[in-house]
Amino acid sequence: MTDLDLRALLIQSRFDDPSERRAHARGELVRVAPGRYVESTAWAGLRYEERHASRVVAELGRLSTDVVVSHVSAAALWGMPLIGRLPGRVETTDPSRVRTHTGTHVTKYAASLRDSDYTVRHGLLVTSPARTAVDVALSSSRGQAVALLDYCLRTGLCTIAEFRECLDQRDRTRGRARASWVGDFASPLTGSAGESVQRVTMDGLGFPPPQLQCRHEDDDGLIGFTDFGWGRFGVYGEFDGFVKYLDREMRHGLTAEEIVVLEKIREDRIRALDHVSAVTRTIWRDFATPQKIAARLERAGVPRVRTAYRSLHRD
């Protein structure tokens, strides 16, 4: 997202301009905030996080008072992964407020901010990566919080020490146990948001923690790395988000069909290894029915070490 000029995407409506209303009705413009539009062709090319980020820039441009973009909205501006439905309102923090205010388009949380808790990004005041990760860990699901912190650790946006220091500075008690757990659970070795959510799901289902990014070789050399592994059971797992099939940059000039064939050859080589008894594969859709993931792992030979969390979907 660093190369995307969010402000340049926005079309600011002139007062009561009928031509823009007609363009919106024809589907040529997407309304991202009152009086603010993005061309539908540009909107179609935006990633999930970028769409919310454009709404953030549009809404904040309409406010007369300075607030700091925070929580999931700050995550979008940093390019951090967002899981599930995007928030209906832009989330901000206003240290001058005594109580949190939820408006039609913007939520203003009442909370103190240190100078180190925010910076400028895309021309807006935005909470720092560590503060953003803590805000999300205190208020969102485990899956969202871990995906975000894993990303920060993997990309160097913040360190676990910075996350813990920021959490220690917070006076809020609600959600603190979950946020502390997120700090313990997060890992820079997780390669994608889907892998993060799968780790949280498997932990919630009661499975033992897997090794991450397991290296595999045969007589022909390096085969590659599997996302997860339980070496003592001979079971290895992959999360397939389909990005490598759809993203042209990740395909490196190959067609989607060629990628599928290469992936099949790679997996066959892994399955042929003496230490591998099973390889499982998970996709985004599987998270809607986590018990299917549990059944798949148990069939492969990975036992549960404890009972599943009752709040697996909610927390």
Image (cartoon, helix red, strand yellow):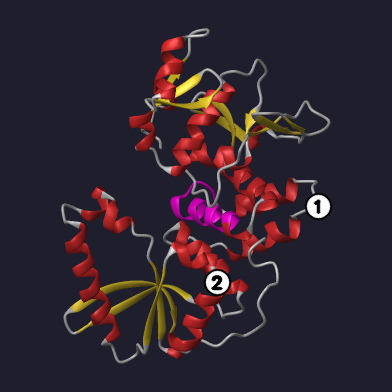
Magenta residues (range): 144-158
Q: Position of residue 293 (x, y in %)?
A: 50, 75
Task: Decide: few, some or many residues near mark 1? Use Cα within 10 Å; few <14, some 14-19, many ≥20.
Answer: few
Q: Is residue 255 above or below residue 37?
A: below
- Mark 2 belongs to which amino acid? Pro
**Is residue 7 in sight in this rendering?**
no
Indicate the position of residue 230 as horizontal and vertical percent values: 46, 83
> Magenta stretch: residue 131 in it?
no
Residue at figure coordinates x 75%, y 46% from the top left: 170
| Label of residue 173 in the image | 1
Is 114 left, or right, of 33 in this rendering?
A: right
Residue 18 pos. (x, y %): 45, 10
Instruction: Look at 59% across and 85% down and name the residue there.
Output: 304
Q: Element under label 2?
A: helix
- Check disc 2 and report the residue beneath it: 290
Quadrant housing residue 207: bottom right
The amino acid on which the numbered mark 1 sits, given as a three-letter code, is Thr
> Which is more N-terminal, label 2 or label 1?
1
The answer to whether residue 204 is above or below residue 117 is below
- Name the one closer to the observer, 90 or 4: 90
In this rendering, does residue 54 appear at all? yes
Front residue of 16 and 52: 16
Q: Residue furthest bottom?
A: 274
Residue that lies at the very extreme toward the right in this rendered image = 98
Identify the residue shown where x is 43% and y is 58%. Answer: 192
> Would residue 312 appear left or right of 112 to someone viewing this image?
left
Frontmost residue, 263 versus 163: 263
* Mark 1 vs mark 2, CA separation in Å: 30 Å
Q: Which mark is residue 24?
A: none
* Image vertical order of residue 232 relative to residue 183, above or below: below
